[in-house]
Image (cartoon, rainbow, N blue to C red):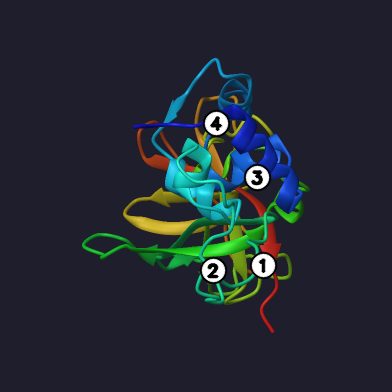
Amino acid sequence: MWEIVPARLEAAMRRVGINRSQLAAAVGVSQPSISRLLSGETKTTRVLDLIAATLRTTPSYLKGDVENPELDTDGEDTGPLPNLDDVEIDSIDLAYGMGGTFLDGAVIQVEKVKFSRKWLRQFTNSPPNMLCSTRGMGDSMMPTIHDQDVVIIDRSQTVPEMGDKIWAMSFAGLGMIKRLRALPDGTMKISSDNHLVRDEIAGDGELYIVGRVVAVVKSV
């Protein structure tokens, strides 16, 4: 843990034109955490290196050890400022088939992909760590979702209280993306947008919901 000089932090933020909410989002902490550092209420942080990198300065400057806010003195090109609208979410390399793809024994690979925070906020206010993306397979959700379209899944939503929304789920050992509707007898109706694909009914304990599909990025 290192101590930050509030005046140095404020000066570095002004220098690059970043406000406290943008800085918080860039380094993965809450806005009140940045506010406490600026007020001096909190003097230590575990993300000092991230804050310094985002503000294009050094930890030594923020701690008050040196006067020069520049990253270096040898003229090295340190690259452009980070795009504070970018946010990384999990990209799951898992065949969530629109018609059903076997999951048993599958090796799930997770990578990080960047999306525009502003674009994501059109569909959900959930934090990035609760979002993931994957590619659908098959044609059972056409014309809404085509084969290889990228879908954004909100993992904070796992209770299908809104009828006929689209969900990522596992049913009978199959990964799928379908519409769900709760039925009066407590079962769940699983439906496709392709009228040629028949509906299925999931009983208690047969359905595991990963999250709700909140956006679709069409493949080209």
Spatial separation of the CA atoms under disc 3 and disc 2: 44 Å
Q: Is 129 located above or below residue 91 in the figure? A: above
Q: Residues within 10 Å of mark 2 (few under 14, many from 20)?
A: many
Residue contact between numbered discs 3 and 2, judged by CB atoms under 8 Å: no
Q: Residue at x 52, y 49 (%)?
A: 52
Left or right of 21? Residue 56 is left
First in residue order: circle 4 vs circle 3? 3
Sequence order check: which comes first, mark 2 or mark 4? Answer: 2
Q: Is disc 4 placed on a helix, strand or loop?
A: loop
Q: Earlier in the sequence, mark 1 or mark 2?
A: 2
Q: Are marks 4 and 3 in contact (CB under 8 Å)?
A: no
Marks 1 and 2, how far apart at CA: 8 Å
Marks 3 & 1, CB-CB < 8 Å contact: no
Single out the mark in the foreground, 3 or 2: 3
Which amino acid type corresponds to the residue marked 4 in the rendered image?
Val
Task: Give the residue drawn at x 54%, y 30%.
Answer: 5
Whether residue 211 appears in this view of the structure is no
Count residues near mark 3 (Cα–Cα under 10 Å), then give few for <14, some for 14-19, many for 20+.
many
Residue linked to disc 3: 12
Per the image, the residue denoted by label 2 is 136
Frontmost of labels 4 and 3 is 3
Q: Are marks 1 and 2 in contact (CB under 8 Å)?
A: yes
Q: Position of residue 166 (x, y in %)?
A: 63, 49
The image shows residue 111 at horizontal and vertical percentages of 41, 65
Residue 185 visible somewhere in the drawing: yes
